[in-house]
Image (cartoon, helix red, strand yellow):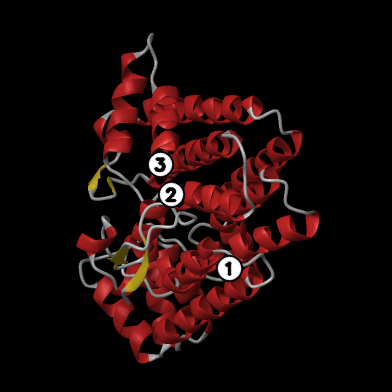
Amino acid sequence: MDVTILSSDLESKTQEKVTFPDPLIALHHDLRCELDIVDSLIRQRADSELVGRIADIADHLFQAGGKRIRPILTVAMARLFGVEGQNHLNLAAAIEFIHTTTLLHDDVVDQSRQRRGRPTANLLWDNKSSILVGDFFFARAFQLMVATHSIESLLVLADSSATIAEAEVLQLARLHDIDVSEDVYFHIIDGKTACLFAAAARVGALIAGASDEECQAAKRFGHALGISYQIRDDVLDFCGSSQSLGKNIGDDLRDRKMTLPLIRAVQTASDDERKFWKRVIAKGKQNGQDLEQAVDILHRRGILDRVQEEAINWSESAKRELMTLPEHPLRDRLEWLAGFAATRKS
């Protein structure tokens, strides 16, 4: 869907029209001056005068790009509430550092070989370097948070960091368990994905002086957006395009992760299908035809369609939370983003 928006500054009087294919590109355009500062902060703080490997890994990661959706949420929400100063930019950079840390650590845990269409840092260097550089980025995140002198924002992001780590351990503990429940699945994605989306939106509102009620609505928006985003990721892992996603299709199956489509496939499995899921996930005995067979089961039973409906429902919840916030052009962009999260191709 193409949407026409005002170019450059949303509050300016210019009426130049620009058409964008998706909301992330539109938001990057609308917020480009502030996002450029965030990017500069990230690159400055990711550097190390003493250790060249830190700079090498940072260059590799940030040259790969990325959607920057979490910093966008912080900056957009802060602008929506009329932020003054630049503390929201420090918070946006801190959130991206936290997110990058989780990616580095995840790739080690999952033994991943590709991210954003490029070799992972642990593949190019080693696991030890990835873990330690991730720790360095995490420390940089807290330096940026402290620089805002906002104890409330620091508390939100500190709590979120603990929740993310807890969810990582929960996922590891239930890895390869074909009888994992949907409740456990949602605890995991609440912590691994939705938590940081919620924190990004909440601290943007908080640092701009929004009321407690408005900050909670911003948090609920970010949380619902993150859940929708992750469920859509689960669907795309079985029906997306490797070129669009920048990673291999079927990675969740190969990594034996019980995502929502797989949980529901096991719940409704015939005896033969259960034997198949037990072999490929619980026992890890996989062959070249297993992904095709898994996709066939998911399509034949209509599981991917029903899981996709769940992503859309969470997207609608995010939109409802937005409607309680002040009217603003950026609120419209974020509403578009909520719909896009559940239907995107990458």
Q: Position of residue 25 (x, y in %)?
A: 34, 58
Residue 31: assigned label: 2
Looking at the image, residue 176 sits to the left or right of residue 143; the answer is left
Q: Which residue is mark 3?
A: 33
For mark 1, give the secondary structure.
loop
Q: Describe the element under mark 2 as helix, strand or loop.
A: loop
Amino acid type of the residue that numbered disc 3 sits on in the rendered structure:
Cys
Q: CA distance from mark 3 to mark 1?
A: 45 Å
Q: Quadrant of residue 238?
A: bottom left
The answer to whether residue 259 of the structure is visible from this angle is no
Q: Residue at x 57, y 38 (%)?
A: 91
Q: Amino acid at mark 1?
A: Val
Above/below status of 18 relative to 158: below
Q: Quadrant of the N terminus?
A: bottom left
From the image, tell me which residue sits under label 1: 180
Name the residue at 34% across, 86% down.
299
Residue occupying image coordinates x 62% and y 64%: 221
Q: Nearer the viewer, residue 185 or 28?
A: 28
**Dots 3 and 2: beta carbons under 8 Å?**
yes
Residue sitting at the far front: 13
Q: Position of residue 247 (x, y in %)?
A: 27, 56
Residue kind at label 2, given as amino acid type: Leu
